Image (cartoon, rainbow, N blue to C red):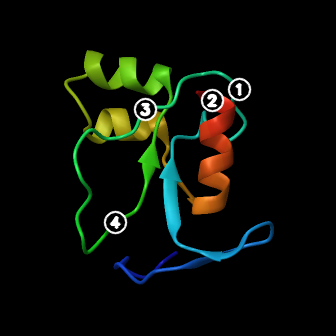
């Protein structure tokens, strides 16, 4: 996903086909029951992608003054497709 994202961006997933991208912290990829946090605000209509992080990332961000370079580095956010996002959400909530 080297191009700039916009509302029409899509990615190809070997399991779910062509879907919009979503973003998660590295812990959620293989996590089970580790919490699932999503933003409380509405997304930008030009970049309406789902994103989530685990309880450990939530605590780390709070301890370090919110989402910034330090907490972003800890979370190591990665792109996935929306289909994978929904599966990960079910597994971690």
Disc marking residue 32: 1
* Label 3 residue SS: loop
| Residue at 59% across, 39% down | 89
Say whether residue 92 is visible: yes
Name the image quarter holding the C terminus.
top right
Say whether residue 81 is visible: no
- Residue 63: x and y in percent read 28, 15
Do tag 4 and tag 1 residues touch (Cβ < 8 Å)?
no
| Residue at 41% across, 39% down | 73
Q: Within 10 angstroms of label 1, few (less than 14), some, or many (20 or more) residues?
A: some
Relative to 5, residue 87 above or below = above
Where is mark 3, residue-wise?
Answer: 37
* Label 2 residue SS: helix
Labels 3 and 1: the sequence-earlier one: 1
Where is mark 4, residue-wise?
Answer: 48
Do tag 2 and tag 3 residues touch (Cβ < 8 Å)?
no
Tell me the quarter of the picture where residue 67 sits.
Answer: top left
- Residue 91: x and y in percent read 69, 33
Do tag 2 and tag 1 residues touch (Cβ < 8 Å)?
yes
Where is mark 2, residue-wise?
Answer: 92
Do tag 4 and tag 3 residues touch (Cβ < 8 Å)?
no
* Label 1 residue SS: loop
């Amino acid at each position: 996903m080297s191009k700039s994202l916009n509302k029409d961006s899509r990615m190809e997933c070997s399991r779910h086909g062509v879907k919009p991208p979503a973003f998660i912290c590295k812990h959620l990829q293989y996590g089970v029951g580790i919490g699932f946090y999503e933003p409380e605000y509405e997304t930008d209509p030009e970049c309406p992608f789902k994103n989530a992080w685990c309880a450990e990332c939530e605590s780390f961000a709070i301890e370090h003054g919110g989402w910034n370079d330090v907490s972003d580095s800890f979370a190591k956010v990665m792109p996935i497709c929306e289909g994978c996002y929904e599966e990960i959400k079910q597994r971690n909530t």
